[in-house]
Amino acid sequence: NNNNNNNNNNNNSSNTNMNITSSMTTSSMTIGGRDDDTKSVMSFSSVESSTFVLSNSISCAYVANDTEHMVIDDVQQIVPFSATADYETKLESALHELKWHSEPLAWCRLPMVDERHKIRAGSINLQLWDVPVWTYVKGGPKVDPYTTGFWKKFGTTAQPKLSDNTKKQYQERENRRNEEAKKKASKAKKQTRKDGKIKIDHVFSLDDTNEPNNEQDLFGVQLCIEFPSYPFLIVAPIVNRRHHPSVAQAIVPYKRRHYPGKDLLEHLIKIDGIEPLSDKDKMLVFSNKEKLMRSPEALPTFLRSVDWLDDEARKVAYDYLERWAKPNNPEDCIELLRHEFMDNRVRLYAISNLNRLDDYTLNRYLLQLVQALKCELHHNSFLSRFLIYRALNNPWQIGHYLFWHLKCEYHREEWCERFGLLMEEYFVHLPSNQLMKDLLVQNNLMGRLKDISNEIQYWYHEAKKSKEHCTNLLKKELNLLNEDIVDVMTLPLNPCIKVRKLIVDKCRFMNSAKVPLWLCFRNADPYSISDEKRYSANTTATTTTTTTTVQKDTTETICHDVQVLFKSGDDLRQDILTLQMLYIMDELWLRKNLDLRMKPYGVIATAPNVGMLELILNCKTANDIHTEAGTYRGSFDKKTHLQYLERCHPPKLDLHAYHKARQYYARSCAGYSVSTWVLGVGDRHPSNIMIHFNGSLFHIDFGHFLGNFKSKKIAGLYKFEREKTPFVFTPMMKYAIDEGKDSSQEYREFVQWFFQAFNEVRFRYKMLSNLFLLMIPSHMPELVREQDVSYVRRQLRLDLDNINELAAHVEVTISACLQDKNRLWDNAAHAAKHA
C-alpha cells in the first residue's frame, strides 16, 4: 500500500510504505498465524480461478483485486464442495458470518530517492520487518503499537539484518510452530462430519514446505520490487525548485487587521496536530494565506493546507515561507520536524530557527530532537548535521546529553545503525580524546552498577536474604568497583560534577521493588560547597517512592559529597519527559514574574531501563509526616503539614522564616497542582509527595501520566478507583496555607497563583502538545497514539473563552479535590502498608 501523505510526496522526500499481508506464489506459504494461536493459519496449496483452495477440498473465499489479505477471526463452520445441491447458498451464508479484518504481517519503508539523491531503478530485494504478536503485560503498552500505523509515519527505512544468534532463534521458533501446527492438524482430521458440515479448529492444513529450508526463509517475508530502468541516472535536487526570489519579494501581507472570517481562521489555527484538517478547511486556509502571514503560530496550519503533490502550490508555499512572520519563540519551530512536514525546505527552515536557541535552551529539547531523527529518510540529514554541529561546539552542555540520548535508543534494531553512526561521527570529530574517554568511563561505570543492582535485587527479593546480608554484599561489590575507578571522573547526570571514589560506608540500597542504589561519591573539587546544610532535625532525601531517614548532626556542617541514585529496571524516559514539562512550565511562569518554587530534579537515562537520578536533600515525604501523628489518624489530621513547618521553623524563634516557609509551601502547592492536573500525573500517593525543609512542596516518581490513574481490584471483582480527582489538594494542604482561617488572604493568593499559572499554560498549549507528539516514536507505554495527547487539551478546557467561566471551572475543580474523601482513605491504606 502506498501511504504517501499529500504533504511529503515531493521528489526528494517521498517514500513508499508497504504493508505486506500476503504473497501469492506457486509454492505453499503460511499466512496469518505467526505465534498467536487465536488466528487462523492458512496454507495456500494452489490458486485456481481466483479462488483460494484449502487442502484441495474447501473453498474459503474469492480473491478480490486488492493487495490485502483478510484474516479469519472466528472460524465456525465451512461447507464442503459437494455436500448438498444448494452449496452456493450455504457457502455465501457461511462466509457472511465470518469476521474479517486486515492484519499486517510485515512492513518496510523505501524512499524513492536514495541516499545519493538518485531515483531508484532496477530490481530491489527487500527484507521486511516482522510484526510481532502483541500481548498485554503489566507496565507495557495498553494497545498494540502496530494498530496505530506508526511504521507508516516514522518507521525505519533500513532493512533487518539478522545475526547468527537471531537466525538460530528464528529456526527454533519455526520448528516449534510447525510441531504445534502438526498436532492441531492431526486433531482436526479426527473430527467427524455431522449434517454435511465440517467443524474446523482454526487450522485448515499443513504443508511441509512451510519449514525453512535456507537462511533466506529465516528473514520472514521478502519483497522484490522492479523499478523502471533508464540508460542514464536521474538525480533529484537536495531541495525542490522554487520561483525566482523576486516573486517572494512581491508578496505583501494583508493590511487590515479585521476581516470577515477571522474568527473561523483563528479557530483553525488553534487546532493541533492530533486532528487533521478537512479538505474544505485546507482550501480556506490556503486561499487566505495573505491574511495569516502576520501570525507566526499560523505557519504550521498553512503548511498543512498545501497540496505538496502540486508543483505550483509547492513553489507558492516556498515563497510564503520566506516572507512569513518570524516566530517569537524559536522553539515553536520544533513542530515542523514532525512526520507531517517531510519537505526539505520546511525542515531546513525549522532548523534555521532552532539554531537561534542558546545551548542551555536547546539542551531542554534534545529529547524530542533525537526522536525526530526517526522521521528522517536517510542518516545524512539537515537535522543530524545540526545536532552534531552544536554538540561539537559545546561538548559539555549539548554533546554529553546528546550522546546519552542516542545511546538510550541504540538497543532498538531498527535504529541502531543510524544512532550508532551518529555516535561514531561525534567521537571522530571531538576536539579532544579526553572527552571521549570520559564518556567511555561513564559507560563502563553504569554497566558495573547495573550488574551490582541486579545482583542485589536477586538476593533481596528472589532469594529472600536479609537486609544485613545484602548490605554486606553491596559494600563488597562497591569496594571491588572502587579499585577500578580512576582518580577523577564525571557522572552521566551532570558532566560539570567531578567525583572520585565511592564512600562505601555511606552507600546503601532502597527497599523498593527495583532496589535502587543510593551512592555517595567523594567530590573531586575541594572548593565546591553545597548549599544543603545539615540540621539537627530528622530529614529524608530521596527521589523514589521509598524514603530513608537520615540523622543529622547537632552542629552545622557543610556536605561536600556527591550523592546520586542509580536505578535499574525502570524506564526513566517518562520521568525525563514529565520533568521536562515541569521545567518548561516553570520557565513560562517565571517570564510572567510568577515564581512557584518548582523543584524539578535531574534524571538521565543511559540505557534501556537504566539511569541515574539527582537526590534532593533535607526533605520528607508526606507519608512520613502523616505517620508521625499516627498511622491512621495522621492521614485525616489536617494540621500535620502545618505542624511540620512549625517544627522546621518555630514561629517563636524566627517568625519571618516561618511565614516565608508557608509562602513557599503555598506557591509550590499551586505550581505542582496545576502541572500534575494538566499532565494527568497518576500514582500520587503520599510517598510521592515531599516537603523540603524550606517549605517547598514537590512531586517525584512520574511513572504514570496523561490520565493513566491507578486502580485496585478488591476480591477480584470490584474495581476501586484510587484517584478520582485530577490532582492532589487535601485539607491538610489548605490548612497549611490559611491556618484554618475562613477567607484568608493567603488562600486567596493561592487561588490567584493557581489560576494565573493555569491560564499561562493554556496560552502555550500547542507547544506542550507538540513535545508530546514528537515523543510517540519512543514507544513509551502510556504514549503510543496521537489520541493519548488529547488528554492535555481536555484538561485545559480550551473551549472556555470567557474568563469568568474559566475561573469558575478552576474553583469548582479545587473544591472537588478538597472534598475528595476517597483520597484520604487511600492515603491511610498506603500509610498502613508502608509506615
Image: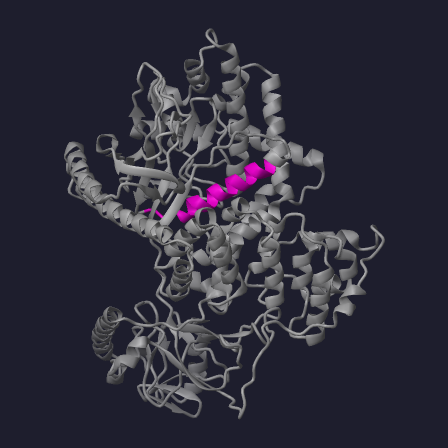
**Residue 633 drawn above or below residue 168:** above
Q: Is residue 579 a member of the stretch shown in magenta?
A: yes
Give me the residue at 33% from left, 35% from top: 524
Q: Residue furthest top?
A: 652
* Image coords of residue 63 (percent x, y): 45, 84
Q: Is residue 721 left or right of residue 167?
A: right
* Image coords of residue 480 (percent x, y): 17, 42
Q: Quadrant of residue 201?
A: bottom left
Nearer to us in this view, 295 or 381: 381
Give me the residue at 57% from left, 42% from top: 795
Principal SS element in the magenta part? helix
> Can residue 328 be seen?
yes
* Image coords of residue 94 (percent x, y): 42, 77
Q: Which colour assignment does the render follow?
A: one colour
Q: Quadrant of residue 355?
A: bottom right
How many discs mark residues in the rendered view?
0
Q: Is residue 420 left or right of residue 306?
A: left
Which quadrant holds the C terminus? Answer: top left
**Residue 397 drawn above or below residue 298:** above
Q: Which residues are magenta?
A: 570-589
Nearer to us in this view, 253 or 249: 249
Q: Is residue 582 a member of the stretch shown in magenta?
A: yes
Nearer to us in this view, 223 or 176: 223
Q: Residue furthest front?
A: 432
